[in-house]
Image (tube, rainbow, N blue to C red):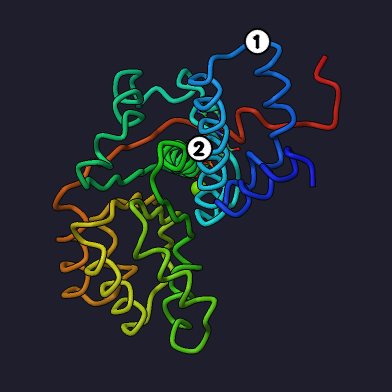
Amino acid sequence: MSAIEDLKSMLKTLNMYHTAEKLNDLLIQSTEKSLSYENFLEKIFKCELNSREQKRLETRMKWASFHEYKTLDEFDLSEQQSLSKRQFNQIKELTWLEQGYNLILLGPPGVGKTHLSVGLGIHAVKSGYKVYFTSMNDLIQLLKTQEILSTSRNKVKRISEADLLIIDDLMFMAMEKHEANLFFQLINKLYGQTSIIITSNKGPEDWGELLGDPAITTAILDRIVHKCEVISLCGDSYRVKHRKTIFCTN
Ligand code: ADP
Ligand code: MG
């Protein structure tokens, strides 16, 4: 075995697979630039650390289960007058997440609630946080099937380990008491350790309709609203305003 093959094998034994793969390139570059021993070692370790961070990021992104990829950079603030640039930058800083605050994004359909929540979620994943995105419907299905399905159990486990849970579209389908109870149990478990973003077209004062039981509603609201920022988005639907057409517009 050549010296380089020997080195690659040793790197693999040390679980430095990425560096083993890149070793030839790293050696050529370092020779060309006449790097010092110190800089060469730095290059080797940076190569491995960057690759590991990239893998962790990819795993966190996969686990987050975003239904669509919408970033904060793609969010056009001039289209959303109810959120000032200052407020936008403030929520982008993620201090609220660090401090365990929840966000409730309210507004009619098409004003960007899902876009903003996904954008914040992706930004949080890139900043090193564990995020889980789900619709309210899917969440209830997960909670109901966790006893019998290991896939649901694994997802519920990810939710409990997440720093941020995004519940998109708190719909107004009447929930059975058993379902509202499961939802309460989850909120209670996450309370104080996981931030939650909820998007909805109705405010907390109307959530009783969805959750049915007044006692459960109060208990859930109590925990969510305790440390919470409510952001009301308004205006016309972005979809309607920017409707695509198959006809020529001139
Ligand atoms: P909501 O969840 O409030 O119903 P969405 O977030 O799904 O609305 O937005 C509908 C569509 O309009 C999406 O494709 C979204 O990317 C786009 N959109 C909404 N608001 C904005 C905005 N301010 N800037 C860019 N795109 C927007
Ligand atoms: Mg939506």
In the image, is residue 155 above or below residue 247? below
**Residue designated by label 1:** 33
Q: Residues within 10 Å of mark 2 (few under 14, many from 20)?
A: some
The first of marks 2 and 1 along the sequence is 1
CA distance for labels 2 and 1: 21 Å
In the displayed structure image, the side of residue 65 where residue 20 appears, left or right: right
Q: Tell me the SS state at disc 2.
A: helix
Q: How far from the left and from the top, in percent, is residue 206? A: 28, 59
Q: Residues within 10 Å of mark 1 (few under 14, many from 20)?
A: few
Q: How far from the left and from the top, in percent, is residue 70? A: 56, 37
Q: Quadrant of residue 220?
A: bottom left
Q: How far from the left and from the top, in percent, is residue 215? A: 16, 75
Q: Tell me the SS state at disc 1.
A: loop
In the displayed structure image, the side of residue 19 where residue 150 appears, left or right: left
In the image, is residue 151 above or below residue 227? below
In the image, is residue 210 above or below residue 36? below
Task: Depth check: give the residue in front, 157 or 73.
Answer: 157
Under mark 2, the amino acid is: Leu
Q: Is mark 2 within 8 Å of ligand 1?
A: no
**Residue designated by label 2:** 49
Q: Quadrant of ligand 1?
A: top right
Residue drawn at x 21%, y 74% is 216
Residue drawn at x 45%, y 21% is 77
Q: Quadrant of residue 247?
A: top right
Q: Mark 2 or mark 1, which is nearer to you?
A: 1
